[in-house]
Amino acid sequence: MTKDYDAIVIGSGPNGLAAGITLARAGLSVVIFEAKESVGGGMRTAELTLPGFFHDICSAIHPLGIGSPFFRSLPLDKYGLEWIQPSAPLAHPFEDGSVALLERSLVETCQNLRKDGDAYRKLMAPLVDSWDSIEDDLLGPIKIPTHPFALAQFGFLAMQSANGLIKRFFKEEWAKGLFAGLAAHSILPLDKVPTAAFALILGILGHKVGWPLPKGGSQKIADALAAYFKSLGGQIVTGTNIENVDSLPKAKIILCDVTPKQLLKIASHRFPASYVKKLEKYRYGPGVFKVDWALSQPIPWKAKECLRAGTVHVGGTVEEISTSEKEIWENKSAKKPFILMAQQSLFDPSRAPPGKQTAWSYCHVPNGSTIDMTEIIEAQIEKFAPGFRDCILARHSFSPRELEEYNSNYIGGDINGGVQDLYQLFSRPTLRLVPYSTPDKQIFICSSSTPPGGGVHGMCGYHAAKAALEQIKA
């Protein structure tokens, strides 16, 4: 390829596409190179089990997708993206057949949480009310806050461990389990700071925007982003793996939707030794083991209310979830894993043949684990949904190694682009005034290894592109 560009983006995940769109909107000529034959990164859908059963390969439920300030600025509905809102965002069942429900309505959620309803309201209502004021500050790099008092109110609660906040606010198992499940999305031990932040943000989003799924599969998000990017004059080249940035066409800037490990592979020769050492110290976290099922019927939950929810947290009590998440940091595979499940076909009939269903799940495992968790996952689900195994028509499993082979950003199965503990949450990938920049003024990193971290929201790519545009102006 001999054509020159203003900007080149490596990788077409949500952040690569967001970066490309931001640059193209600014009037630059932009090309995106993607190693796979289709765009999407973690936003792909395929018939993994049987013909006619469409499974989200990676991401499935998208509170940050519909809640992303950047995605909201795009006319993605005109390019085929349609959000489906389940009746309830989240269900958290218990083995005795009871369930805690996260409803869109804060009032209804409080009613569901029984004696802890008032405590939940006192905790969440002020944060839900102030979310519009603080979302831009939270979903980006550290900066002088636009609304410092509102952000301080959130930060006081968020910069705690989930277990600590649970002990402070809740007395009954329903609220404790619900909050623990939200916090477990951090893939950190629940006695560590800032696990409370993950629970609060996901809970707030449940009330503000819901936990929706894209009609037809997560691939529809990628397709809509790619179509809009092309409408701006952008170009996408698939099936092209970039092994060295020097092999790229000439460009003013290069944005890399890769983690530090891949960035070193393709560009370490462009960086000073001190920066290389910093990237080499970047820490990756636990991985995930994923299972998808083709089912003959809806999952037979003990708690029938689970059928109202697009997402189900299978993990039981706060103690069980805390133990599960702690074990993986001790390099152990949990005997009773916390499982994140999605049942998209209940709300999107296009995902399965008439009368049939799909289910999507994963649990956390040590980074690079080689243990097949399929049987353990199914046994855990069976406790909350007796007869689940009898519904299985076919299954497909992804080990951490297979996930990394599928998407090279998932190092050892780490879907968050690196540990999101207190230090690395604010210093990803290294501690720099502009975290997206590198010592080479032409090269930027725009993956989930930069602020604000993992999730399908495009904010990492957006902020990286804005930083690159500032570099060009300078």
Image (cartoon, rainbow, N blue to C red):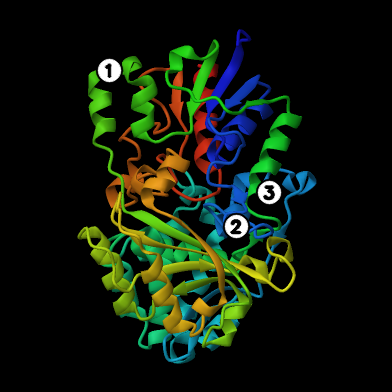
Sort mark 3 into few (<14), some (14-19) or many (20+) by Cα contacts within 10 Å.
many
Q: Please say if the residues under marks 3 and 2 sit with CB atoms less than 8 Å apart.
A: no
Name the amino acid type tagged 1: Pro
Q: Disc 3 and disc 2: Cα gap in Å?
A: 12 Å
Q: Residue furthest right?
A: 78
Which numbered disc, 3 or 1, marks the residue closer to the eye? 3
Using the rendered image of the protein, determine whether residue 247 is visible from the camera's viewpoint: yes
Determine the image quadrant of residue 324: bottom left
Is residue 331 found left or right of 314 in the rendered image?
left
Residue located 56% across and 21% down the image: 8
Q: Please say if the residues under marks 1 and 2 sit with CB atoms less than 8 Å apart.
A: no
89 is higher (above) or lower (below) than 259: below
Q: Which residue is mark 3?
A: 220
Name the amino acid type tagged 2: His
> Where's residue 279, x and y in %?
29, 31
Q: Which residue is mark 1?
A: 272
Sequence-wise, the earlier of marks 3 and 1 is 3
Q: Which mark is residue 55?
A: 2
Q: Residue furthest left?
A: 330
22 is higher (above) or lower (below) than 305: above
